[in-house]
Each structure stands twice: as structure tokens, then as C-alpha cells.
Amino acid sequence: MTTDTGVSPTGSADPRSSTAERSGPRDRSVLGRFASDTLTMTRRNVLYLVRRPQVIVFALISPIMFVSLFNFVFGGSLDVPGLSYADYLIPGIMVQTVMFGGSNTAIGLAEDMTRGVIDRFRSLPMSRLAVLSGRTLADAMRGIITNTVIIAMGFVIGFRFNNGLGWAVASFCLVLLFGYSITWFYAWMGLSLRNVEAVQAASFLPAFPLTFAASTFAPVENMPGWLQVFSAHQPVTQVVDATRAMMQGGEIAGPLVRSLLWCAGIMMVFGFLSVREYRKG
């Protein structure tokens, strides 16, 4: 009886054996390799975040400040029919937080490009899309923590879910989905600008008009007529209205469908542009 040791009679390694060992990962499906590479990149970015606890601390302080300031500064002067201002405010703060949080994706990618990390990733036998999907997924996961803190702070100031637990969970998921779609826009921005300082300056430009010229903090009906046209149809208003309706009751179907269409459109357009920009690099 003989045993195949993978060594040729001349004492060198049998090339057939090494080829067989290498064939395993190569035989995996494209989808399987992409999923595995995405999980690896997500883990890398999550660990990088965990090792910088000061980033997490400031990410938690910011929404707490927004909840407190807007509730106590504007809560007494804004009349929202049928709702307390706390119930009206919390969905808006949640959407605003994931909107602003997407800038971390742009800054992170710009830093990786500046340090040459992206060039090293390109040289590895891995899915190119996984570099971007891992980054966006890890950054979107931060929204789970920040939005949990926002809801907890909301309960302190009087916020309550008034439409059942199922819709409350669905509203939370919708905000996370919107946050994930927005990270693809910021991924494209980071890959396009490439400079950390430029990205930091530019990342807040789209976030401010989209969050403040929306139903985030005040009803659209209270805005000037020319601004209502923009505010009523832009994505932040749709997501905020859908989230608020799921939490507090009201028309859900229309805003929810429009929100999902916006999320899908943003991911498709900026996902394509991000991958193209990454390949050009």
C-alpha cells in the first residue's frame, strides 16, 4: 500500500498536489467569493472603528445634542397637529443622523486612498466590489447604535411608539436601509475627490439642504410655496414621513413605496458610479 505525500520522486513538491490545493477557493462561485470578501472587509472596518473609541463617543454625543436642542428650543414654538413634538421629532433625528453619518464613508475611503491602502487592496486576488461593500456595510452598522441611543433619549423626553411593535421595528429597518443607500453616495464622493480635506468640506453640503429643507423638524406646509415643491418630493422627506407614519400611525403605503424606490435608485446609481471610479483609480 502506498501513500501519496504530495512529493515527487526527485524530492520536490508535486505540482499536481499544489494545484489541487489551490483549486478549492478558485472553484467557489463568484457570489461566494464576493460574500466572503465582503465579510472580511466589513470585519476589517468594524475592528478599525472599535479601536478608535473616541469616534464612537462623538457619534453618540451628536444625536443626543440634536434631540435635546431641537426638542427644548423648537418644541415649545412649533405646533404639530395630532402629535407631541417629541413624537414628531425623533423620526426626523434618526434620518438626519444616518444622513450625516454617511460622510464617514467618504472620509474613510479618502484616507485609505491617501495612505495607499486602496492600492494594496487592488493588488489582492479579491472582489473589487467587496472593498466598497465592506466599507459601506460597516459604516451603516453604526446606525444601529446611534439610532438606538436616539430612541432611548426620545423616551426620556416623552417619545412613544403608538402604532405597535411590528411597525416600530419596520421603521427602524427603513432608516437603516436609507442610511446604507446614502453610504454609496458618499463612497462615490470619497473616491472622486480623493483628498481628505476636500471630502470633509464637501460631505456636509448635500446633507444640510436635504435634512433641513424637509419634514425633519417642521411640517412642509409651513415652508414657502417655492420650497414646498422641493421639500415634498425629495428622499429625506419621504423616508421621514414613512418612518413617522409607521411609528405613530397615518398613511404608510405611499411614503413607504416612494422611500424604497429612492433607496433602490440611490444604491443602483451611486453603486455603479462608485465601482467605476474604483476601477479607474
Image: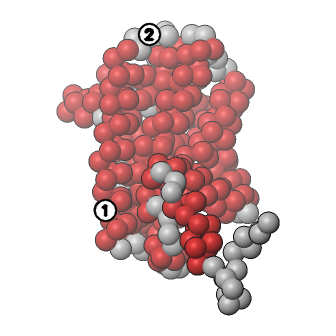
- Amino acid under disc 1: Arg
Q: Name the residue located 71 percent from the left edge and 53 percent from the top edge.
A: 57
Looking at the rendering, in which quadrant would you find the C terminus?
bottom left
- Amino acid under disc 2: Gly
In the image, 18: left or right of 7? Answer: left
Would you identify the image quadrant in which residue 225 lies? Answer: top left
In the image, 183: left or right of 274? Answer: right
The spot of residue 171 in percent (x, y) is 53, 24
The spot of residue 58 in percent (x, y) is 66, 54
Q: Name the residue located 32 percent from the left edge and 45 percent from the top edge.
A: 268
Q: Name the residue located 48 percent from the left edge and 36 percent from the top edge.
A: 177
Q: Secondary structure at mark 1?
A: helix
Above or below — where is 10 with respect to 117? below
Judged from this view, the residue extending furthest toward the front is 1
In the image, 140: left or right of 53? Answer: left
Above or below — where is 178 with respect to 135? above
Looking at the rendering, in which quadrant would you find the N terminus?
bottom right
Mark earlier in primary sequence (1, 2)? 2
Residue 276 badge: 1
Above or below — where is 145 with respect to 14? above
The spot of residue 192 in percent (x, y) is 34, 67
The spot of residue 175 in percent (x, y) is 50, 33
- Whether the residues at callouts 1 and 2 have beta carbons within 8 Å, the answer is no
> Label 2: which residue?
250
Q: Residues within 10 Å of mark 1 (few under 14, many from 20)?
A: some
Would you identify the image quadrant in which residue 186 lies? Answer: bottom left
- Number of residue marks: 2
Would you say residue 86 is visible in this rendering? yes
> Which colouring convention does the figure follow?
secondary structure
